[in-house]
Structure formats: C-alpha cells, structure tokens
Amino acid sequence: MSTHRRDLLKGALGAAGLTALGGPAFASAAAPRSLSLVNLHTGEALKAVYWEAGQYIPDAMAALNRVLRDHRTGEVHSIAPGLLDLVTTLTQRLETQQTVQVISGYRSPKTNAALHQASSGVATRSLHMQGQAMDLRIGGVELTRVRDAALSLQRGGVGFYPGSNFVHVDIGRVRRW
C-alpha cells in the first residue's frame, strides 16, 4: 500500500462534516474509486480510495466496513464491493462532491428482526443483513434527484422514504418502492 493511501486511511475516521471527495466520473475501469461517507448515528466519517490498480484495497474496505457497521450492536460485517461501486457511481451521476450521509448500512439479524417487529416496512430478509444495502441522503441534493439518479442506474432496488428523508439503494434485483 502506498504511503499516500495509508495516510489517507490513518486520518480518515474523524468528526462528521468532512468535505467531500472531488473528482470526475470514472474515466476508465482502471480509475481509482473513492467514497466520502459519514455515519449519522455514530458521527464517524471516512474519506477513502477503496479500489485502485484493478483491485479493492483491503485496509480501505475494512475501514468502510467499520463505518457502515450496525450502530445498534456494533457488529461489523463485510460490505459488498458492488454496493460501494453503486454508491460511487450514484454520486458521480449526481455530479456532486458532497459527503454521503449514511442512515443505515449493515444490519445484524437481531437489529433487523427488532426493526421488522416495529415496522412492516422492514423486510424480514433485508439485504442490509448481507451488506448489500444502504439507506442514505446527500447534503445539498434534493431527495427526489437522489432517487431518480439511483433509478436511472438500473443496478438494484431503490426505495424512496421522503418522510424519513432518505433513499434506500441495494444491489439486489432491479425494483422500486
């Protein structure tokens, strides 16, 4: 791992309110991929290059898994690389440099069962439990624009929750609600 990436990861976790990553859309399949996230429940923020030189970067993936953990139980789970790529592509489609605000990443089966019991809107076999779904919003970007951009990608499920101010994205089959 290069010194630059280590320094980036070492200083990545910090207070919410980091400025977002800049950069154009993927110039090619070989272009580095990066994300800037803040977990709204823990306040942890991460700005990291997670894919470079044709491969996912293990230290960056581990840091992303930690930020996207189940905030209720503290359980860390692997987040599907395809979900990270989807969110990266979504921010590029929106042409935004704002940090992605994460409401929910991974959910443990215990957390999901409790949420399902409290609300019929939570799926019993949620893709959150497999690290394949994220509930998010992007500061300064209208929620309808986030939803429409996610739908335009045709890369998984998109749920629209304007009352709760978030959009659900996942890498399951293409569907909407």
Image: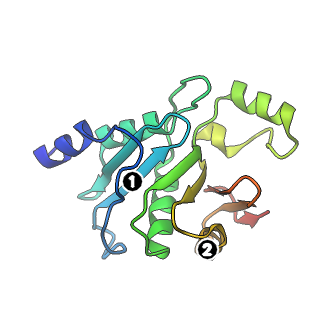
Camera-side residue of 140 and 74: 140
Q: What residue is disc 1 on?
A: 36
Q: Residue shown at 31%/49% (left/top)? A: 48
Image colouring: rainbow
Q: Residue shown at 37%/44% (left/top)? A: 46
Helix, strand or loop at label 1? It is strand
In the picture, the quarter occupied by the N terminus is top left
Q: Is residue 83 left or right of residue 3?
A: right
Q: Residue shown at 11%/44% (left/top)? A: 3
Q: What residue is disc 2 on?
A: 145
Q: Dot 2, how many residues are within 10 Å of its Cα: few (below 14), some (14-19), or many (20+)?
A: few
Camera-side residue of 56 and 39: 39
Q: Amino acid at mark 1?
A: Ser
Camera-side residue of 62 and 139: 139
Camera-side residue of 139 and 168: 139
Q: What is the residue that sits farthest to the left in this orientation?
A: 3
Please identify the quarter of the rendering in which residue 22 is found: bottom left
Determine which of the numbered discs, if any, sits on residue 120 in the image: none
Please identify the quarter of the rendering in which residue 21 is found: bottom left
Helix, strand or loop at label 2? It is helix
Residue at mark 2 to residue at mark 1: CA–CA distance: 19 Å
Q: Residue shown at 31%/74% (left/top)? A: 28
Image location of residue 158, percent across then percent down:
69, 62
Q: Amino acid at mark 2?
A: Arg
Would you place residue 104 above or below residue 142 in this image? Answer: above
Q: Is residue 167 left or right of residue 5?
A: right
Image location of residue 17, percent across then percent down:
40, 49
In the picture, the quarter occupied by the C terminus is bottom right
Would you place residue 33 above or below residue 43 in this image? Answer: below
